[in-house]
Image: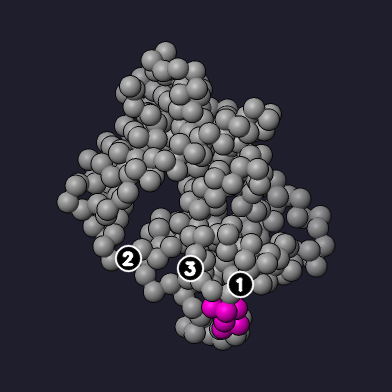
Amino acid sequence: MSTSVATAVTHALPALTSAATHPSIDLADAQSDLDAVAREILAARARGLTLLDAIEDPAHPQLRAFHQGIRDALFVELPGEFDPWIAALTGGSSDSAASGVQLQRMLVGFAQGRGAEDRDAEQAGLQAALAELLVFESIRLQLLVLALSTEDYELLGGEESDIDAIAWVEVQALLHRLDVDDPELRPVHLIHAAATVSLARDAAARTEELRAAGDDFREELRMRARLRAALRELRLPEAVLLENALSALLGGERRELTDLQAERPIALDGLSRQAMDQRVSRGRRALTRPRQGWPARRRPALFDLLRVT
């Protein structure tokens, strides 16, 4: 039986580092989760939804959780045992770079339907759907790191949902036009470059539109941008809870804590209602004090390592 994309990806990811340095990963669980996500993508397609629509649809909880979860994972404090793995991934070693390019070509090839003739129609559909999602999430996460490294994009009214939309447009425009057999091509790098240009164009268009906006609106955007930037410096549980508590200031919808916990398990799993209430109260007070008193991360997150400075 042919290897599934879920199997290939979950086995390829640890191979980006040496066997002696990568942290323990439950590949069976990861593969099962990816297979479930792929099935929801196909169900969404059957309903006429694009991937961008499906990730916001409560009818696809596994897909929504995956999409939100990998975003939240950017801000999880990395334990010390991950240090050798992180060093290998961020150190630019030739082995890691080569493995990364190989993984790019594999994902794009799966998304394009390569090798589909060796599988039944359902398996081929799952392969392509999951690979397309992973390419999209890769582009989206890279744009998030770029856009959220400063307050600039949010000062212009840009939202994370706008970044999602830009990433999706570029994936759709280029994914099926790339030649993965070209040894000089890094397909995901190419899509990312196009998406970065689109992000810059979006920012320029927003700048032009804001010239006609009133002072009150621009001040509201500045307040939101600064508050969101401050929240990104906090430990993930505090950031998620305070974002919800301050939703009226941030232009969002306040969620019941139990609902929020179900939607953001990476941030809030295992916390009691009392513990969440206490963190909100302490966090509110802390944000009124100098920065050194904030509940900031004690160890770096991936966002801290990847952010553009």
**Residue 194's disc number:** none
**Pointers 2 and 3 in contact (CB under 8 A)?**
no
Q: Are marks 2 and 1 in contact (CB under 8 Å)?
A: no
Residue closer to the observer: 225 or 280: 280
Q: From this viewpoint, which residue is outermost toward the top?
A: 117
Foreground of the two, 66 or 286: 66
Q: Magenta residues, as a range?
A: 274-283
Image x and y of residue 292, in percent: 47, 83
Q: Is residue 97 above or below residue 42?
A: below
Place of residue 106 in the rendered image (x, y in percent of width and height, measured from the top left): 37, 28
Marking on residue 270:
3
Q: Quadrant of the N terminus?
A: top left
- Which residue does the numbered mark 1 point to in the structure image? 242
Between disc 2 and disc 3, whose residue precedes? 2
Please tell me which residue is depicted at 23% across the width and 57% down the height of the picture: 84
| Disc 3 residue type (three-letter) | Gly
- Amino acid at the residue labelled 2: Pro
Q: Is residue 77 magenta?
A: no
Q: Quadrant of residue 16?
A: top left
Position above or below: 279 against 141: below
- The C terminus, quarter of image: bottom left
Q: Please tell me whether mark 1 or mark 3 is closer to you in this view.
A: 3
